[in-house]
Image (cartoon, rainbow, N blue to C red):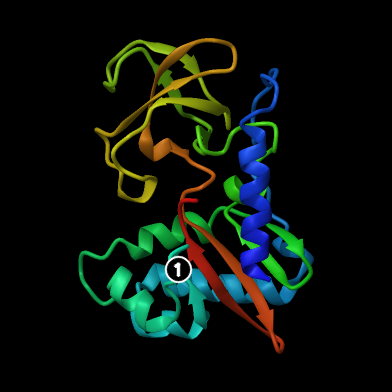
Amino acid sequence: MIVRWLSIALIAFAAAANAAEPTPPARLLPVDEAAKDPSFVRFRNELKEVIARKDAAKLFHYLASDIHLSFGGHYGGPEFHKMWKPFDKDTKVWKALSLVVDNGGTFPVPGGFAAPYVYAAFPEEFDAFTSVVVMNSEAVMRDAPNANARIVRKLDHDILEVVNASSSVQHEAGPNDWVEVKHVAGQRGFVLATDVRSPIDYRAIFEKRKGKWVMQTFIAGD
């Protein structure tokens, strides 16, 4: 079922590449449907606490035994351990997970929750493969990749076209990582990679199995 959700989403994203030029406003405000299922809210709050404590041992209690980790056939807890090394001091897993779990999502089907909202609620009329969503309501576009450069425009959850991507995904980006972008209104400039997220960056599918929620998918890319 999870693979089917991902396939449907990717087909929609690909079809959006041929859609007509979108018209302003081009924004994606945060969406969180979790409150529709109190049992999921409890599960997610517990998971957030595990992430905040960086409790690697406890984390595996929240992962499905067959968790889907790539489109190349990587499954299960041992593969998660191998890919993310959650017990290592310098692991990037906690930042990657928090950006997914802390940022809303939707119920695409009963008993299944997709997160974050940037993935789950991304509008089909935009190309998910060449777009980023501004997640910081105080973000700005500058005319050069420099924190002191002139501000081209203020941003508020805008959907932007990527001209030149950062070499770092959001959870690995730092204060010197920038994305060159184009606004739907025509302006071009640079935004911090920490302030924007691709819809095909890491996302999670949570599934309720026999009354218990688990993270069934944690995957990035297409």
Asked whether residue 55 is in view, the answer is no
The foreground one among 54 and 191 is 191
Question: Residue 1 occupies which quadrant of the picture?
Answer: bottom right
Give the residue at x 69% y 18%.
Answer: 24
> Could you tell me residue 65's position as x and y percent?
50, 85
Residue type for callout 1 = Leu
Identified at 57% across, 54% down, the residue is: 116
SS state under label 1: loop
Percent of width and height locating residue 36: 78, 65
Residue 58, image quadrant? bottom left
Q: Position of residue 110 (x, y in %)?
A: 79, 69
Regarding residue 53, the answer to whether it shows in the image is: yes
61 relative position to 114: left or right = left
| Frontmost residue, 209 versus 100 | 209
Q: Residue furthest left?
A: 89
Nearer the observer, 195 or 200: 200
Is 31 situated above or below 1? above
Q: Count the marks.
A: 1
Left or right: 25 in relation to 76:
right
Tell me the crowding category of disc 1: few under 14, some 14 to 19, or many 20 or more residues within 10 angstroms, Cα based: many
Q: Position of residue 130 (x, y in %)?
A: 50, 32
Q: Which residue is mark 1?
A: 69
**185 in relation to 58, above or below:** above
Residue shown at the point (44%, 22%) measured from the top left: 181
* Occupied quadrant, residue 173: top left
Position of 75 with respect to 43 (left or right) is left
Residue at screen point 70% across, 69% down: 112
The single residue placed furthest to the bottom in the displayed view is: 210
